[in-house]
Amino acid sequence: MEQYIQPHTLLMILCGIGMGTIARLITLHIDTRQTPSFPNGMFISIFLGFVASFLGAVAIPALLAQDLTAVTFLTLGVQHFREVRTAERESMEKLESTEFTKRGNAYIDGIAKTYESRYYISLITALLVVLALELLGREEPLLNIGVSLAVGFAAIALLRVLTKGKCVGDICRIVQGRMTVEGSELYVDGMFVTNKLGTERSRELFLREGVAFVITPSQKKFEITLNNYGQRQALLFEATRTFGVKRFAFSRKSFTQGKVVVAFVPILNQPDAILEVLRRTPVLENSRKIHTIMKSPVIGGNAHG
Amino acid sequence: MAKSAEILVYITADRERVVSGDPLTLYITDEAEVQRTLTDLGRALKADAVRLSNGDHILISG
């Protein structure tokens, strides 16, 4: 019987795998961004979460059994999850030409990194659960399960807080703007947006069905984040992907007023809902140049993924 | 950075501005015909129309 795993060890590993997989399920929320896609992308994410949990769960028992080779599988796992990031990035890049507007490399990079980090959350949760059970050193199944749940949910909560990002709505005020057309030029609240409305038809379409939003940073320093090209692409992408584009999609920065304008002609004309989507657009990691907004993401918004 | 735009067609009502070469330059004096041409070509080429301050129009892609 010695070659078989001990029941207590098996229980510890199963608890670790269970909590690690729950961690991926908790961090897997499908919203308007539809990332991951449903149902196949979602299933892949859950299964990979299970694999990550398995790696985390067996690490401690393997170490205690002096099986150091098994621990090196952790590094293989890390390599694998880096490949997940690459695969997600390539997948999104290939889909760029099919979208209404481009996601942009900055946003793609952020989403891909989020995918990778979520598997580490599963792995670390499983590892911490098994470590706690090992330190507990008791064999009562119910006690082990109870401790697993407590440690697991505490680890998930902590890791979510640490990895949670902010939303544009946290650092900016967004309101609907008033559109005016002069000649072939579109202005929103007096700010120039484009001169591509060269035909009567396009001018009428924009004034009749277009929507425009003015985004104002709540502090001067946030202008740097907001004016980042990747961040503006992400804002326009989220708005247009959720509500569609009949024609025209613009984002324009005004250095004189320190504001950004997003304007387009949506298929679904729901200004309040568009406003909410803009507010919930993540602040991209690589657009956050200011140290103070990188600190303490405790009061962050929803991150993608 | 955003990709650069390309001028596909130049429409003018001034014969002096019609020069050979790229892009295609059209000489049209009737404003209604200009609007129709801009709409038709804009649809066909998936291009945006811009009215210049001198009254001429260009169709640009990108």
Image (tube, rainbow, N blue to C red):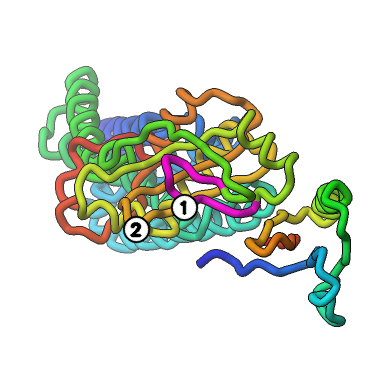
The stretch in magenta equals A186-196
Q: Place residue A177 in its image quadrant.
A: top left
- Mark 1 near mark 2, Cβ–Cβ under 8 Å? no
Question: Secondary structure beneath disc 1?
Answer: strand
Q: Is residue A228 above or below residue A138?
A: below
Instruction: Write the residue at 36% across / 29% down.
Output: A26
Q: Total of numbered circles in the picture?
A: 2
Q: Which residue is mark 1?
A: A252
Q: From the image, which quarter does the N terminus of chain A lie in? A: top left
Task: Find residue B57 and report its horizontal and vertical position in percent.
Answer: 74, 60
Q: On residue A255, which mark appears?
A: 2
Q: Residues within 10 Å of mark 2 (few under 14, many from 20)?
A: few
Amino acid at circle 2: Phe
> Which residue is nearer to you in this view: B32 or A262?
B32
Disc 2 chain ID = A
Q: Is residue A46 above or below residue A107?
A: above
